[in-house]
Amino acid sequence: MSSSQNANRGVPETIHLSERSFDEALVATRGLVMVDFWAEWCGPCRAIAPVLEELAEASEGRVTLMKVNVDENHGLAARYGIQSIPTILFFKEGAVVDRVLGAAPRAELQSVVNTRA
């Protein structure tokens, strides 16, 4: 779990969560957290990943992007009722405040960020 700055771009690194680190990371992170539930084999997941990274980068620290690989973290997927991927959960102060299913358009994701961050 690393939130250090990427030396080349000054962009926060995406935080990859596991069942072990999930709760601790959410509690330790201020602001809005976008958690991308994804899998390596999922085409729509790969398509939406750069959009999520750009939204987090453009938020100037108001939004943190975290990712959960559902193939490696079945318990977290079950805990949050993830039935299809990609699913992006938005957390604030450790609680789910919004949910976007599928590879949603950038405008829809931006709207959630604007409303919640």
Image (tube, rainbow, N blue to C red):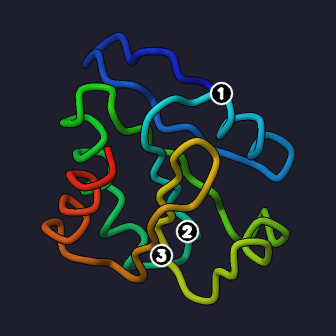
- Residue 66 in the image, given as x and y percentages of width and height: 53, 46
Dividing the picture into quarters, in which one does residue 93 lie?
Answer: top right
Looking at this view, name the residue that lies furthest to the left: 107
Q: Earlier in the sequence, mark 1 or mark 2?
A: 1
Tell me the crowding category of disc 3: few under 14, some 14 to 19, or many 20 or more residues within 10 angstroms, Cα based: many
Type of the residue with mark 3: Pro
Q: Earlier in the sequence, mark 2 or mark 3?
A: 2
Type of the residue with mark 2: Trp
Dividing the picture into quarters, in which one does residue 65 lie?
Answer: top left
SS for callout 3: loop
- Residue 107 in the image, given as x and y percentages of width and height: 13, 67
Left or right: residue 2 compared with residue 6: right
Marks 1 and 2, how far apart in space?
22 Å
Marks 2 and 3, how far apart in space?
5 Å
Residue visible at 56% across and 37% down?
15
Q: Which residue is mark 3?
A: 86
Which circle marks residue 38 in the picture?
A: 2
**In which quadrant is the N terminus drawn?**
top right
- Residue situated in front as seen by the camera: 115 or 82: 115
Circles 2 and 3: CB atoms closer than 8 Å: yes
Q: Which residue is mark 1?
A: 28
